[in-house]
Amino acid sequence: MDNIAIKLLFTLLGLFIVLNWGLIQAGIMNKIVARVGKRIGMPVYQPYFNLIKLYSKRTSITHGVMFYLGPLFRLSGGVGMFLFMPLIFGSEYWSNFSFAGDVVLILYFQFFGMLGMALGAGEGGHPYSAIGVSRGLSQWTTIELPLTLAIISIAIQYHSLSFTDIVAAQQGGITHWTMWTNPLATAAGMLAFLGTMGHSPFDLVKAPNEIPIGPPTEYHSTFLGVLRTNAAILHVVESVLFMNLFFGGATSWFELILKTFLIYFWSVFVGVVFPRFRIEQSVSWFLKVPLILGILAIIFI
Amino acid sequence: MVAPIYIITIPLGIAFLIGVLGKSNKNIGGMFMLIALACMSFVSAQWFISFMTSTQSPVYIYTAGFKPPFSINLLMGLNEAFFTLIINIATLLGAIYLYNNLKKQGTNAMSVFLGFAMALNVMVMTRDIFNLYVFLEIASVATAGLIILEQGLKSTSAGFKYMIATGIISSILLIGIIFAYNYSGTLNIDGLIEANIGILKGGAIAIFLILIAIVLELKPFPANGWALDVYQGADSGIGAMISAASASASLYVLYKLFAIAGESWYPVIAVLGIITFIASNLFGLKQTNSKRLLGYSSIGQIGLLITVLGLSPYLGDKFEFIAVTLLISHYLAKAILFWISGIVKAENIKNWSNLRKKPLLVALFGTAVFLLLGFPPFPSFFGKWELVMQLANSGQFAWMTAILVGSFFEGIYLFRWFGYTLKLDNKELPEYKMKLNKIIPPAIFGVAAYILGYYSGTFVDAAKGLDYIPLLFIAFIALINFLPAWVKNSISLTGVILYIAVIFPEFDGDLLRQIFAAIFLGGAVLALFAGFYSKGKRSGFHVVTLAMFAGLAMLLKADNLLEIFYAWELMTIGSYFLLIRGKKSMPHGYSYMMFSLGGSYALIFGFALAFVSFGNLDLQSLSGITIYPTLAYSLMLLGFMTKTASFGLHIWLPGAHGEAVVDIHFMASAILLKAGVFGIILVLLGMGTEASYAKYILYTLGWIGAISALIGNIAASFQESAKRLLAWSSIGQLGYIVFGLALMSHLGWMAGIFYTATHFLYKGVLFLTIGGIALKLGTPYMYRMGGLIKKMPFSFIAVLIAIITLSGIPPLVGFAGKWLFYNAIISQGLYFQGIVVLFSGIVAFLYLFRLIYSVFLGQLKDEHRNVKELPLCLLIPIYILIIAIMIISARPDFILKPIGNYLLAYFPSGALNWNGTMASTGLGYWDGYWVMIIVGVMFTLLFGWLLILNSKSKKVKQFNMVYAGEKPFRPETTHMSYNMFSGYNKALGFFMMPGVTGFWNWMSDILHDTANYFRRIYSGNGQSYAIHIIAYIIIIYLIVF
Amino acid sequence: MAIEEQNKKNKFIDPDLEKREILSPDGEIIKIDPMKDYFCDAKPKVHEPANKVIEKFLNWSRANSLWVLAFGTGCGSIEIPSLMTSRFDANRFGVQMRPTPRQSSVFIISGYLAVKTLKRVIRSYEQMQEPRYVVALGSCTVNGGMYYDSYNTINRLDYYIPVDVYVAGCMPRPEAMLAGFNKLKERIKAGRAEGANEYAEKFDWYKANQKKIIKDWNMPDYNW
Amino acid sequence: MEQILQDIGKQFKITDIVKKRDNLNFITCEKEQTISLITYLRDIKGFSHFVLLSVVDWIEDGVFQLVYFLNNPDKKIDIGIRTMISRENATMTSAHHLWEQIATYQRELKEMYGIDFPGSPRVDESFILEGWDDIPPMRREFDTKKYSEENFFPREGRETNDPEEYMKKKLYPDEEK
Amino acid sequence: MEYISLITGFIMLMIGLWGILSQKNIIKIIIGFTIFDTAINIIIISIGYISGRTAPILDKAVPVKDAVTKIVDPIPQALVLTSIVISLGVTALMLAYALKLHKYKNTLEINKFKDLKW
């Protein structure tokens, strides 16, 4: 840890790249969704405008300390996951602070952001935000089930829970990827990925016109800006997580961007096609096919 | 030494003197009676002491100077001295108790009473069988006379039934005697023994008749209808005399005459006894009349003593000790109970809640109940322990189970009765005055129970290690019960701190005990410190709390099985009294006691098997169990799991903890449940993993842990009351620990022990804060709270930290437990149990958010507008725990390394290897210290950035929110907390079918229905009782010959 | 009691907003004045832009990301969804519908405003964060339109809330609305769309007009 | 339809029967008899469907004309019962016990015309107008234009043109009269 | 033949027992008890009987020194004395009970006094 300063610099640079890539990725996805609806859709750089406008708002209100800190927790959740996630395999600089923890750390760090968001929404005092949070949490419990099963089956397969070893085991062509060697786990994992991303079949939590927009009902101006920045980072880091686990990690930035785009596109693609689930449907959906896939993944390693 | 003959002559003389005095001057007559009884007890006490201390040899007293065949001789041996002593004391105190009744009846009643006392003494001392018959007859006539004392239809009809029954019994005895004389030629018992007439056909019948008459005198099961009516009909003082004094006399007579019968009789007597014991206790379940229930219980206890008599060949040299302790306990308890029923005069057991008007009576009633059931400080505890050990030693497992099942039934109705007394309201019940002479006898016997308990402890060699200092300290606290709460609190606090200083160095070698000592005693200090919040007297609270903590401390110090069992039972008593304090806690306290009772009986059975297979009682015996090992280990685990409320045995916890007050809730959940964990650790250490059966046990244990974790967490999310939510979550967390221990691997155990420690920390915080808030707001229901973050910021921060730890979110220490579990599950290979545990870990999120949202966030209700922060005496312990959590989170290796080294001794392979603060296993790695720093730095940086961005945002009030252009109506209608996870309930609600409670209810219904069906045979008709007696004789005759 | 008389004075007081007394768990009586306890009624302040150059850039980004509040009044609200269809597609100009006034910056008043709806419009308008703009559709907002002589529809919207762009027409077609958006963009970029500050300056005048016609004004003066 | 009218004629004092269509007739009856007539029609004559209750303001003769429309779904015929009540402190016995929805109509009439229906549920609560303190607005003596000018800041520069001259001036400007 | 008294004793015993168990009236039960007791006394006496001997009264006919060969076994007769006294006492108490029971329900049917049951 002697060159901690350099590593810090590279991590900040990585964060900058990931943030920008997140925003552009969101712009592209909106464009694609619009094209599916035969609309021209928002320009690709629209997320930048939204962010700047949000940050440039002159007034904002706060319901209390926890409300104020909610978005901060959320952002630190996203940035924290980024910090502990090794981005580029092999390069000592681009693996951020992943020496501090393995897959389990990342798995449980997701809750950090969610808890902060839940508490902030709670402090807002709006009943709809509380309903949104309760739906989000109940949905999250069953999303984690197939994900945990997949991770455990990978851990059994590669006898390790640390990212670097998993990615190392998948190097050397497509046939070495987990997608190839352990398809069941990948299937369960990718179905769980749909839930984590919160796109259409499972977007009941932030559904725009269902209960205003769920938890962030009371958030606005700079708070919403912070939440949107985190959303950008989080989407990229989640897809990097799934990339490292199932699709052989990335040896270069270009490979990372391509793979994350395709992984993220998978959830958007499903989102565009399928309508929204009700809460009990989405909770019990994960206990059907994904669960069985996960169990089979463990049995047939 | 006064000649024993005076024991007979004094009462006879005084009786006639009183008769002479005539009806008028009753007071003098009363005084004379008391003097006579006092002299009798002095004489027998003198002889008893001389036998106990000096080597006094038994003395034969020859009446009229002739040798036996021609005259009646009496013997004053050690046994006779002991029995006459207890009879005389009982009659003396009984006379004091009945002084007014006897005075009201006049001098003839007094002389009848003296006659009754004299007859019992002679029955014990005489060696002549016909003399025995004569005085037996006098005793029964005197009893019949005394029954009439209570003028009333009930007592008269009961007396008449008694007369019929004893008439038949004595005539059969007479026939037996005369035929025995016919064959042996002598009436002297010693002569009969030499004559050994059993071998002759006719002689055997004679002996049969004699013995069956004496057994019938002791009210065996089918033929004891008359006895029940007597107990119900007679005055309670008389009932006390019958059940205490005459029962012991007839028991000794049976023991004396046994020598004649010879070996073949033992099993018969044992069978008769055990049937009576189990049947009468079973019938007691449905009984609601207090005195009749006492009748059932005394008949049951006598049945137990008969069984002990019958099993004497198996009990070896311990027989006297067991018989004496059980007899003494029965004698003291029955006397106390009957005397109390005389004072409170409540027919229905539900009206016994009237007892609470006089706290001393409640204490005595409690002593009697625990004395009867064989709980620690009392002699019957050691008696029952030795009984079970000796029976196991001689391989009589069937007898053991029968005795334990019988005493379990007795426990059921006694604790239900005790629960009614403690909890049902007694506003409209009639007032009653406690006269001095009515209260002295039970008080004396109560104190005698404790003293004899200590004294009988000295006999048992395994009990040498028990230190009685804490018990003395508790007695002292009991005495100062009238002081205000904070005085008692500070005294007991200093006492506990001193005690910690004394015993903590004893554990310095053994880390496991150090951790548990820190949890138990550290928790005790925090709980007592939190106790300062309560105003008023809180009578009885400190006694039972210290009893529980004394039990817990003793559990750690115990080095043999007896001490463990002693500590376990002491802790159960303390925790029972704590849990029963809640307003609506009677049913839950009752079910808690039933589970712990069943659990302790399973434990004692397991310990017996361990004792038998290893030879002695120390802890190593847990490892090498050879006889029925699967049964032994599973029973012991079941026993300990009643305390950790694992799946199947968990239904008592939500109710019991839901009703408890704040510090009791903390003690019960954060500390008490760990005792079970300590027990499981001991058993699992003993069992090891090699044996074939161990695999199955561990597998099922793992599944039980996993399922209880899942059920606990899911059920917790649907609770409306905050306390029940925490109670269910404790079930979940304990399920974690049990699962961790069941993995039997280095990592599994490290996870389990680590979880026990951290669970104490964060659950302690949760219980204290939520309990304090529920107390302050007057309601445990979450939908009535809300928006308290503005009023109670400190408790919010505390609960937030506790929630982050519990859910295992990285920077704080909870994550270490989750990480250990992950590695343990994968390395151990128990994937599916592991998945269930990890899934329930994530489900924990639901109820955590619900707790912190409904209590602190959301809308502040009008009535809580100027609620103040929690009292300081609660905040300080909370923040001590918070600091502890933060320290461990920063440097988790402070705890993990020592646990690792400790576990190396038991599980050498699969340990954590450390470099610096980075812990790594074969699979993954984790560096708590660096995670904490990175997250901390990142958080502060982002916080600074957010401050710059958003420095001037306007603070608004609670209704300034987007409500579709309108404004909300009232805070109550806009706080979303009732039925919060309804969607989740629809999806996964089926988990919550109350299967287990249904099972246990079904079991208890079966018991109660059988009891209700069979007790119909006591039809109340005197004649049918006579037929029962005759039929009983004939059936036994046919069986024996 | 004193409190009952106070409430009686104002005929239209909302029962939930009457002053009342509550018994707290530890037995002490608490006086609740809903208007002061539940609502923060601080006056709005004028927020002058800090410096010209940055403000120009920020205005440029504000213009390109117009978040419209989903609040339809009168017959124009049926025209707004058609904007989102592929034929007219307001998304091209960075216009997006937002459900809550907190997050939206453009408030489209899409038709005649009854006094009742005006009360809700005012509350939503005041809950929007600055800088905020109002686009008024149809002639009813200009001069009352065909309801000029009705007893409960207002005639001139700008007396009640500051309006940036009027789009005339007895319900303008979507193309007109898109033209309105572009006109709004020009105003924002030119920095002349300071309706919020104007509202803050002439706050009392606006409030007097509003209270003149909304008789049951049982909500705080300024709705955060 | 005639048969029904004869029967009614026998029992109730009804005047000027107007036959709009073969399945729609209007009858007028006394104020006191209206409720009993309606009950009769409903229970006996099978007019089970209540269509609407409305009022006509004859300010000149100082009278409100209440019209109850009933429909007989089997015979598919309609009937309108008209009653005259005075305009000053107009009151009418409530008919909410016959059909629940009548209470809503009565509430609206109370707010808009000031006709009081004692006993009708929630009759004096505000129905559409919030915070209205002037006289009931639908009454003809209430001048909405004057009220709007007083209260609602009309924008100046609005003049009304007679469409004929306006179009002529527009299309043929040069033709001077 | 010397067992004649023993047999009569047993027969009376059975009659007494039958009286106790079958009769409904309390007085009859008490009478049954008295028969039962006298039967036992007879048995006791007959146990001591040695055929061909006389009663154990030392008078002219039975001199002290050869009394041992002439008289029957005296001990049972001594026992019978106390047994009679006892059965007297018991019967007296029973009658007192019967009187009191009659006072309460002025009936002597044994199955009327069934209020203490189960």
Image (spheres, rainbow, N blue to C red):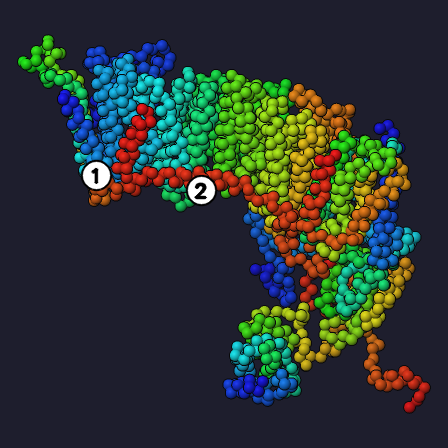
Q: Percent position (x, y) of residue B546?
A: 53, 29
Q: Which residue is mark 2?
A: B424
Quarter of the image for residue B658 reads top right
Residue A150 versus residue A202: which sits nearer the camera?
Answer: A150
Query: Can you see residue A199?
Result: yes
**Quarter of the figure with the N terminus of chain B:** top left
Q: Percent position (x, y) of residue B138?
A: 23, 26
> In this rendering, which labeled residue sits more in front, label 1 or label 2?
1
Q: Which residue is mark 1?
A: E23
In the image, residue B648 above or below residue A71: above
* Residue in view at x 33 percent, y 18 percent: B262
As helix, strand or loop, the secondary structure at mark 1 comes to: loop
Mark 2: which amino acid?
Leu
Label 1 resides on the chain identified as E
> Which residue is most to the top?
E65
Label 2 resides on the chain identified as B
